[in-house]
Amino acid sequence: MESFVKFTNQSQGRDRLFRATQYACMLLSYILENKAGREKLVMKLKHVESNMSSGRKLFRLGNMVHAIEASKASIQLSDPVLCYCLTAANLNRILYFTCDTVLWVRSVDLVSDISKEKWRHRASQCYFYSLLFHIARDLYVIRNCMEKERQCKQKGSDCGNGPTLNSDNTRLESHDSFLFILYLSLKNNPPLLLDTIKNLCDLLSPLDRLGFYKTNPGFIGICGLVSSILGIMTVANPQLKLKH
């Protein structure tokens, strides 16, 4: 109970719970949409989904400041690739939160002459570019981890937290050396694995909104729910969060 209270006291923790609820409702409403006699339930689920989305916008009002501070920190990184990817990602997050704030102002009718569709499109673009830079960072870190594992394998040593040689690894190694090194790299770096999966799942939503890859609310709901659960895990256990 103490850990749950500590989790919900964090703004990120509450946002992750709201986000998981939002995408769970999206998924359930899609599944039940064509079921006879479920019309009222579907409407309730869509209403809850809308409320969760509005609540998350309210929680995110101060996130622009955090994104600015993150940009200041990332620009100090000594690795030029990490510096570029993370700074560019954070700058796009700043623009995304700016668009998000404008949409919240419009949703509460503080300003009425704002085009929701135009600002949603801008927000989706900024979110999309931010995710692309985060994924580029993930791929760069994966490449570095694979190179480290390859060097250790050549020296016959173990660079990970556990044994690198067992029957499954031997079969995989004999099948494809690249897959074997990739497997070891992700196995020995759970934060990197979780962050990569999370960013790939998040990418589907802006791809759909921008028209690059049209899908259905059910698939977006599944990916959003998986991403939210991974986000909850990283907030609950900071050791699972990728540092740079």
Image (cartoon, rainbow, N blue to C red):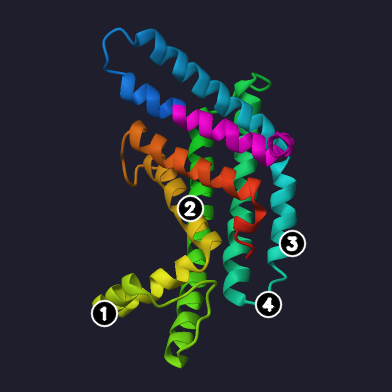
In this rendered view, identify the residue nearer to me: 60 or 88.
Answer: 60
Q: Mark 4 to mark 3: distance in Å?
A: 13 Å
- Label drawn at residue 199: 2
For the residues labelled 1 and 3, say whether their Cβ atoms are less than 8 Å apart: no
For the residues labelled 1 and 2, say whether their Cβ atoms are less than 8 Å apart: no
Q: Is residue 111 above or below residue 13?
A: above
Q: Quadrant of the N terminus?
A: top right
Tell me the quarter of the picture where residue 69 sits.
Answer: bottom right
SS label for mark 2: helix
For the residues labelled 4 and 3, say whether their Cβ atoms are less than 8 Å apart: no
Residue plotted at (47% across, 80% down)? 149
SS label for mark 1: helix
Give, as a three-letter code, the residue at label 4. Answer: Ser
The first of marks 4 and 2 along the sequence is 4
Mark 3 against mark 2, which lies toward the viewer?
2
- Label drawn at residue 78: 4
Q: How many marks?
A: 4
Write down the region rendered in magenta: 1-24
In the picture of the structure, the residue carrying the numbered disc 1 is 174
Residue plotted at (67% across, 30% down)? 58
Residue 125 image offset from top left, x and y in percent = 49, 47
In the picture of the structure, the residue carrying the numbered disc 3 is 72
- Quick check: is 23 in the magenta stretch? yes
Residue 41 in sight in this render: yes
SS label for mark 4: loop
Q: Mark 3 to mark 2: distance in Å?
A: 22 Å
Residue 68 image offset from top left, x and y in percent = 72, 53
Q: Is residue 67 above or below residue 38?
A: below
Q: Is residue 14 above or below residue 161?
A: above
Q: Mark 1 to mark 2: distance in Å?
A: 30 Å
Give, as a three-letter code, the residue at label 2. Answer: Asn
